[in-house]
Amino acid sequence: MVDMVNMADDAGDPEATEAYHLPDEGWDCAACGAAWPCEVTRTDLVRDLGGTPAAIDKVMRGYLLDALTVRPDLPSRELADRHLSWIGVSGSP
Ligand SMILES: [Zn+2]
């Protein structure tokens, strides 16, 4: 899967390092404070993955697993909805 943390840490590529909004320890966006994935993250993913729902879905399922670990207090259905429900909906050209 795409590792956005490593991409964000790599200062060599201006395309990839453009201020990714990453989840904080509470799984809110560390950059804008919105519930993660925030709108900026969604837009970035759609752009970087070419708007391919299958690719985005794969990445977001990886993050969903992380989210379930980080926020076991939140309903898994809600987390799944948050991570997966927007794919193929927003960011269409
Ligand atoms: Zn954000």
Image (tube, rainbow, N blue to C red):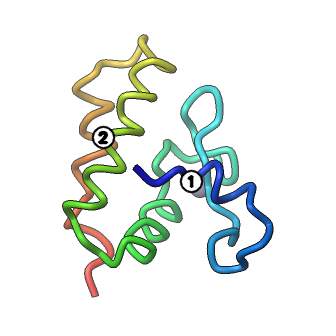
- Residue 43 lies, in percent from the top left, at 44, 70
Q: Are marks 1 and 2 in contact (CB under 8 Å)?
A: no
User: 50 above or below 34?
Assistant: below
Residue linked to disc 1: 4
Identify the residue at the far right of this view. Answer: 11
Label 1 or label 2, whichever comes before in sequence order: 1
Residue depicted at 74% across the width and 55% down the height: 9
Q: Nearer the viewer, residue 1 or 82?
A: 1
| Image mark for residue 61 | 2
Residue depicted at 46% across the width and 49% down the height: 37
Spatial CA distance of label 1 from label 2 is: 14 Å
- Residue 20 lies, in percent from the top left, at 63, 61
In this figure, what is the number of numbered marks? 2
- Under circle 1, the secondary element is helix
Q: Residues within 10 Å of mark 1 (few under 14, many from 20)?
A: some
Query: What's the residue type where badge 2 is placed?
Result: Arg
Residue depicted at 28% across the width and 22% down the height: 76
Quarter of the render that holds ligand 1: bottom right
Q: Nearer the viewer, residue 26 or 62?
A: 62
Quadrant in which the C terminus is drawn? bottom left
Residue 81: quadrant of the picture: top left
| Image mark for residue 77 | none
- Under circle 2, the secondary element is helix
- Residue 29 lies, in percent from the top left, at 60, 45
Residue 28: quadrant of the picture: top right
User: 29 above or below 50?
Assistant: above
